[in-house]
């Protein structure tokens, strides 16, 4: 029997066996994470910025990096995307995503692959989704550089946890060695390093302020088209301002 034909009780049992869930999904009337600390997450967030993504994605390809249980991948498939590939490093989340997509009858590929290894895909995507992953990485700018260089063709949907001041200073192109007061300004790009834990999560490595994520996106070669929600940006791939590539020599396709 396919998952699409499961009874409510069978779905509930599978949800329990696959849990705990970070994404609260509605699987034929059964919620996967009804007591999520952020409410009906990510639906509450998605509702605040869903209009920046084209309603019709027919013929488009989508890569969802750090897809978790597949909420955004499934939303993109629902909008008609021809190909949707979801990546995550966590097999348990991928098992949730595969089950959820099957229950909903959506044809999506989910694969275990790290954001650092997107070069091995050897494929570009019209829309790359990189939501809620940057601050979980020890090398966040490397990941953004690799996404720009290897898999982004046009649009990037990006989100990061933000902490600190939300002002954004105008940054000079250069500062003299003896000029240092800009670093103390609340609106200067700042990436706070978390040595131990934040919110009980040892994988929260960085907490950027708003000026910092905007500067990182620009520096990796993404221009900001829209900022529809506090933490969310829609960007377009452009040429990297300093076109010398990631410091770490990135690998291209291995095939
Ligand atoms: C906070 S969740 C965000 C999930 C989803 N993108 C969203 O916005 O709701 C972070 C996800 O990134 C995944 N992740 C962490 N490190 C990763 C890496 N190096 N490459 C790909 N995914 C990663 C985690 O397993 C987790 O599913």
Image: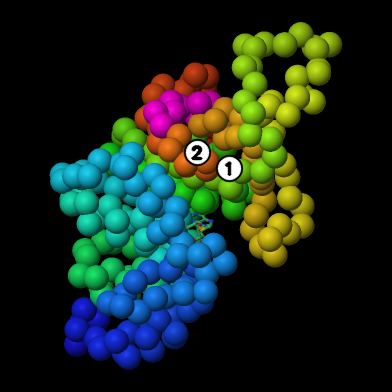
Q: Establish if 59 lies above or below 239.
A: below
Residue at image position (29%, 87%) is 8
Residue 51 falls in image quadrant: top left
Q: Quadrant of the N terminus?
A: bottom left
Q: On the picture, is 67 further left or further right than 184?
A: left
Is residue 7 covered in magenta?
no
Q: What is the span of residues highlighted in magenta in the rendered image?
A: 218-226
* Mark 1 lies on residue: 140
Ligand 1 under 8 Å from disc 1 Cβ: no
Residue 42 falls in image quadrant: bottom left
Q: Position of residue 2 (x, y in %)?
A: 20, 82
> Helix or strand or loop: what does disc 1 sit on?
helix
Query: Quick one: 234 or 155, which is closer to the camera?
Result: 234
Residue extending farthest to the right is 178
Q: Position of residue 39 (x, y in %)?
A: 50, 65
Residue 144: image tag: 2
Query: Quick one: 51 or 178, which is closer to the camera?
Result: 51
Cβ atoms at labels 2 and 1 below 8 Å apart:
yes
Residue 253 seen in this snapshot: no
Is residue 220 covered in magenta?
yes
Q: Residues within 10 Å of mark 1 (few under 14, many from 20)?
A: some
> Helix or strand or loop: what does disc 2 sit on?
helix
Q: Establish if 236 lies above or below 2.
A: above
């Amino acid at each position: 029997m396919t998952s699409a034909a499961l009874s409510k009780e069978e779905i509930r049992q599978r949800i329990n066996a696959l849990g705990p869930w970070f994404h609260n999904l509605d699987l034929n009337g059964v919620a996967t994470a009804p007591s999520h600390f952020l409410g009906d997450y990510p639906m509450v967030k998605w509702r605040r910025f869903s209009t920046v993504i084209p309603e019709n994605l027919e013929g488009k390809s989508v890569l969802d990096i750090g897809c978790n249980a597949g909420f955004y991948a499934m939303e993109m498939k629902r909008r008609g995307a021809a190909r949707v590939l979801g990546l995550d490093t966590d097999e348990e989340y991928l098992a949730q995503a595969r089950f959820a997509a099957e229950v909903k009858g959506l044809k999506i590929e989910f694969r275990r692959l790290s954001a650092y290894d997107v070069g091995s895909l050897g494929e570009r995507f019209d829309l790359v989704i990189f939501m809620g992953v940057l601050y979980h990485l020890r090398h966040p700018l490397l990941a953004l550089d690799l996404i720009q260089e290897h898999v982004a063709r046009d649009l990037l949907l990006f989100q990061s946890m933000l902490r600190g001041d939300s002002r954004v200073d105008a940054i000079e192109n250069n500062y003299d060695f003896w000029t240092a007061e800009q670093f103390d300004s609340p609106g200067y790009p700042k990436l706070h390093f978390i040595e131990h834990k934040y919110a009980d999560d040892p994988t929260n490595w960085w907490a950027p302020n708003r000026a910092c994520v905007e500067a990182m996106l620009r520096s990796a070669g993404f221009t900001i088209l829209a900022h529809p929600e506090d933490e969310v940006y829609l960007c377009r791939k452009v040429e990297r301002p300093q076109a010398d590539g990631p410091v770490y020599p990135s690998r291209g396709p291995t095939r």
